Amino acid sequence: MKKITTILATGLLFGACSWGSAAPVLAISDQGGAAAGQAESDFLASLGSGFLTETFDDNTYYTPGTQSATINSQAGVGSFTSVAAGSGGLCDSGIYDCDNGLAVLDAGTTPFNGRYSVSGNNWLDSMDAREMNISSVAGYNAIGFYMTDPNDAGGRFSIGGVDFNFGNIFGSALGNGSIFYITLFDTEGLGSVSIFSNNANDGYGLDNVTIGMVAVPEPGTLALLCLGLIGLLMARKRQKK
């Protein structure tokens, strides 16, 4: 199993730093539009030419409010699949059925509060899926996206078979409408990313999903990064005593 280094805005470090082998890196912005927007700008600046971004705003390709088990990206970033449906919540209200899968939504079609478009009018909604899989196209080593309303503290990301609990990443249950920017970098190339919810009637929205190529950091840079993260973690532990 590959080691994973997780970088959080809070300074917590999960997994292990690896100087001798490639290690995927998961990074989460601070909560809030300004912090998330800055994280997106920094991520885009780190990419080489030829990156792809899916905004879900092409209404000649997407019909807001239409559900599907798998939604393929018009921009070519990959596919999004509802692996396990939710139940009992607003995804089973009005014209919607949780079992019918994901949906691109806008302000006029959403049954939810707290999930919204970051740019343009549309976003991809989990429709309270218990598990969503993001499968990016081959040939890229980094992905970034906005996540709105991830207030399910018991959910988790699963990357390469390694789980990261929302409670550890985001803290305790979040208020309605929270927003973060999330990035994943892997020198060995992107695999699939799964997002789990522990509640059958809770979900989130995704927007501005970008895939691209980031230059591989030098070993010395990774060493300094890991030392800094470990220092932050030790400082936090001392403060709690």
Image (cartoon, grey):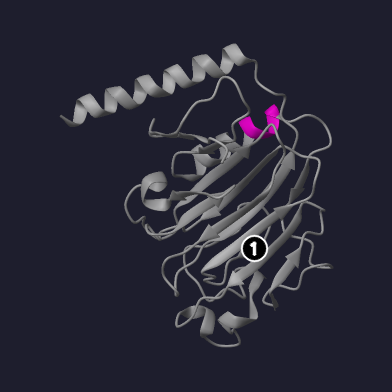
- Residue 156: percent from left, percent from top: 46, 55
What secondary structure is found at the residue carrying circle 1?
strand
Observer-nearest residue: 208 or 109?
208
Residue that label 1 marks: 124
Residue appearing at x 49%, y 66% in the figure = 203
In this view, 89 is above or below 208: below
Residue 152 appearing in the image: yes
Instruction: Please check the rendered image and state whether residue 43 is part of the magenta-colored stretch, yes or no.
Output: yes
Outermost residue toward the left? 241
Q: Amino acid at mark 1?
A: Leu
Residue appearing at x 58%, y 11% in the figure = 220
Observer-nearest residue: 146 or 177?
146
Q: Quadrant of residue 205?
A: bottom right
Residue appearing at x 32%, y 52% in the figure = 172
Q: Quadrant of residue 106?
A: bottom right
Q: Which residues are magenta?
A: 42-46
Q: Quadrant of the C terminus?
A: top left
- Residue 25: percent from left, percent from top: 56, 34
Prevailing SS of the magenta stretch? helix
Viewed as shown, does residue 168 lie left or right of 123? Answer: left
In this view, 226 is above or below 240: above
Observer-nearest residue: 241 or 60?
241
- Residue 1: percent from left, percent from top: 56, 41
Q: Residues within 10 Å of mark 1 (few under 14, many from 20)?
A: many
Residue 105 appearing in the image: no
Viewed as shown, does residue 205 lie left or right of 216? Answer: left
Outermost residue toward the top? 220
Outermost residue toward the front? 1
Q: How many numbered tags mark residues here? A: 1
